Amino acid sequence: MSVFHNRSFVLFWLSRVCASIASQMQSLAVGWQIYDLTHSAFDLGLVGLMQFLPLVSLMLVAGHAADRYNRQLIVQLSLAVGGAAVAVLALATAAGWISRELILAVILVFGCAQAFRQPTTSALLPAIVPTALLSRAVAASSSSMQIAIIVGPAIGGVIYALSPPLVYALAAALFLFASLLIWLIEVSLDPPKREPLTYQLVFAGILYIWRNPFILGAITLDLFAVLLGGATSLLPIFARDIFNTGPQGLGLLQLSPAVGALAVSLPLARWPMRGRIGPMLFATVAGFGFATIAFALSTSFPLTMLVLMVYGATDMVSVVIRDTLIQVGTPDAMRGRVNAVHALFTGTSNQLGQFRAGVMAAWLGTIPAVLVGGGATVLVVLAGLRLFPGLARVKSIEEVAPA
C-alpha cells in the first residue's frame, strides 16, 4: 500500500513541500542579498550562526513542548511565524531599508520558529501513518524536501533576478499555506500527558539517546560529517567568483544536490531498504566526504553540478536510514524530546557547518576550506567504525526497535 493513499499524509507531504520551497527561496535570496551587500564570506557564515543560536537555546524546550502539548498546533504556529518573518524581508527590500543587521535579526526570529517546527514535525509523522509504512513515509517525506530544493532555487533565482521583494513575498505566502494544510490533517494520537515540568523530563531525550548506541552512533556520525563536510553555504562564492554566473547559476548549483537526493528518495519510498543498514550508512557518509573533495577540485560548472548530485544522493540515503532508526527505535511518549535532540544535533551541525565553512574560507580560501572539510568527513567515518561497531553490523531496522 502506498503512503499516498493516506489523505492526512498527502496533506502533511504537501505542507512540507510548500514550507521547504519557501525555505529554499528565502535561503537563496538571503545568501545572494547579504553577499551582494557586504562581499564577505564571514557574513555568509553569520547567517548560519543566526539560525544556530535558537536551535541551541530552544530545541530542548521545543522537544518537551512537542510531548506535552498539541503537536499539530505547534507546527501550524511555527510555520505562520516563519512566514511573518520572511514578509518583513519582503517589505524591507521593497521599501529600500534592507540592511545586513536587519537580515541577521530576521533570520534569528526565523530560526526560533524553526527550532519548534523541526522536532514537532518529525514527532507528528508516526501519528499520521501506521508503523508498517513508517520507513516509506520517512523516505517520501524526505523526497518532499528534495523536490523543494530543486524547485525553490530554480524559481527563486529567476524571480530574484526580476524582483527581489517578490521572492520573499512568495515565500511568506507559501509558509502560510503550509500552516493551513497542517490544520486540515487528522491525527490519531492520544492526548499528551501534562506531567510537571522538571529538568529530568526536559533532558530525558538526551539520556535516552546516550543509552541507545544505535541512535547515538547514527546521530554522531551525521553531526560531525555535516559539521566538517558541509559546503553548500559557500555556493554563492562559487557561483559569483569562481564560475562567474548570476543568481540563476547559484540556483542551478543549489538544486543539484536535491536532484541527486530525489533520484534515490523516490525509489526508497517505493522499495524500502531491508538489509545491511549499518554498512550502508557508513558507506554513504564516506561517499558524502569524497563527493565534497571532488566538488572542491572541480573546475567545470557541469561537472560540479554532477558531483553535487552525488553529494546529495549519498546524504539522502544516510538521512533516510538515520531518521527511520530514530523513529522506530523511540517510543511515542519520547518522540518529541528525542527528535528535538536529533534536530539539535543535525540543525546545529548544519548551521555551525555553514559558520565553519565561512570562517575557514575567509582564513584559508574557499577551495582549501572545502577540501579540508571533505577529508575530515572521511576520517569521521573511520573513527565511527571503531566507536560504534554495533551500528556497523545492523542488518535491519527492526533490530533497533525498543523492547
Image (spheres, grey):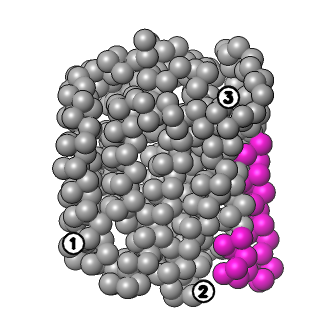
Q: Residue at x 57, y 60 (%)?
A: 52
**Would you call the spot at circle 3 few (<14 residues within 10 Å), some (14-19), or many (20 or more)?**
many
**Which residue in the structure is indicated by mark 1?**
298
Compared across the picture, whether 114 is left or right of 169 comes to: left
Residue 17, given in percent of the width and then of the height, sits at 57, 42
Q: Amino acid at mark 3?
A: Asp
**Which residue in the structure is indicated by mark 3?**
67
| Label 2 residue SS | helix
Q: Is residue 187 visible?
A: yes
**Would you call the spot at circle 1 few (<14 residues within 10 Å), some (14-19), or many (20 or more)?**
some
Q: Nearer the viewer, mark 1 or mark 3?
A: 3
Answer above or below: position of 361 versus 80: below
Q: Nearer the viewer, mark 3 or mark 2?
A: 3
Q: Amino acid at mark 1?
A: Ser
Distance CA(mark 1)–CA(mark 3):
46 Å
Give the magenta range: 77-105
Q: Quadrant of the N terminus?
A: top left
Q: Main secondary structure of the magenta part?
A: helix
Mark found first going from the N terminus, 2 or 1: 2
90 in magenta: yes
Q: Amino acid at mark 2?
A: Leu
Q: Which mark is residue 37?
A: 2
Distance CA(mark 2)–CA(mark 1):
28 Å
Residue 360, given in percent of the width and then of the height, sits at 38, 78
Answer above or below: position of 175 versus 143: below
Answer above or below: position of 102 versus 136: below
